[in-house]
Amino acid sequence: MSTAPEGHGGTPAIRVKGAMLIRPMEGRDIPAVASLDRQVFRDPWPESAYVQELYFNTNAHYFVLELLDPAQARTWHTHRRRQSARLIGFVGMRVEGTQGHISTLALRPEWRGQRLGEALLLTAIDQAICDGARMVGLEVRVSNEVALNLYSKWQFVQYSRLHRYYADGEDAYLLHVYLEKDPDYPPRVRTRLLELMADLEIRPVGLGGVPADMGRSAP
Ligand SMILES: CC(C)(COP(=O)(O)OP(=O)(O)OC[C@H]1O[C@@H](n2cnc3c(N)ncnc32)[C@H](O)[C@@H]1OP(=O)(O)O)[C@@H](O)C(=O)NCCC(=O)NCCS
């Protein structure tokens, strides 16, 4: 493990190059995901919301970014601890008909500022494209400048402002990106995602359109 150059926020970021993977979220991830959700968001989802999404929402795709650890956990308790330690971030995408919706996106604070959030966002958009989405939308707090910058980098534009959308009274922006407006957008998403995976040495496993051998370092 090494300390990377300063991240976006000016805090040193942890970086374990070549030791990460992005894969579909599974039931065993839920305790760690919900714990990170509580750490990151003011209005976290309960574990039951993830159970609902993973097991009962056939339109939902959730992905985790985690540290690779070949060691297998022997007991449930060890297993829970290991999953927590290994989880770096997660993202959720629902695709209904031609509309995609990003339901969540979060990265552990100490891992931010090194394009891992962008890699997760593009994983979700790429999945929506594979599922036939023509637009992707999401809600974001009006004060969330970092996320707003990330979404605007990928051409999300403000569609409306949702008054007192959050439980604490803050407004949300509803953002949309129209995938069919620019025919280069889908290939740009895929190219950038593959670039990030190769550069950050993230292994994709079980993703919609990304071959599993991408992102590995050259032999
Ligand atoms: C939003 C979040 C996922 C971004 O992840 P990240 O890994 O830190 O971001 P990246 O390093 O991938 O940066 C991607 C883009 O985000 C923006 N960004 C990232 N950090 C930023 C910062 N400190 N200040 C301003 N913009 C920033 C930039 O546009 C950046 O692109 P650039 O490097 O070309 O300028 C992460 O900050 C997070 O988990 N935040 C808390 C949860 C949250 O707000 N989720 C979104 C809910 S809608």
Image: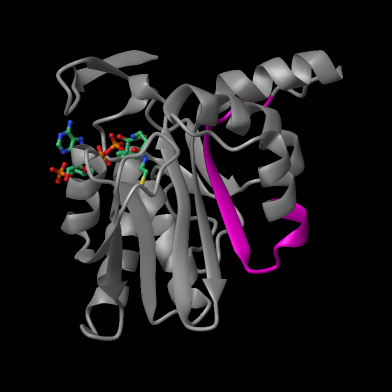
* Camera-nearest residue between 34 and 154: 34
Q: In x, y percent, where is residue 20?
A: 48, 34
Q: How many marks?
A: 0
Q: Which corner quadrant of the figure contains ligand 1?
A: top left
Taking the spot 26% from the left edge, 33% from the top edge, the residue there is 114
Q: Quadrant of residue 107?
A: top left
Question: Residue at (77%, 60%) from the top-left corner?
Answer: 56
The answer to whether residue 193 is magenta is: no
> Where is residue 169 drawn, in percent x and y?
35, 39
Residue name at image x 32 percent, y 75 percent: 186
Percent of width and height locating residue 40: 43, 27
- Quarter holding the N terminus? top left
- For the question of whether residue 74 can be seen, the reply is no
**Left or right side of 157 for 91:** right
211 displayed left or right of 170: right
Residue 102 in the image: above or below residue 169: below
**Colouring of the image:** one colour
**Residue 208 appears in the picture as rendered:** yes
State the residue at coordinates (73%, 51%): 52
User: Where does the magenta region start and end?
Assistant: 54-70
89 sits left or right of 218 in the view: right
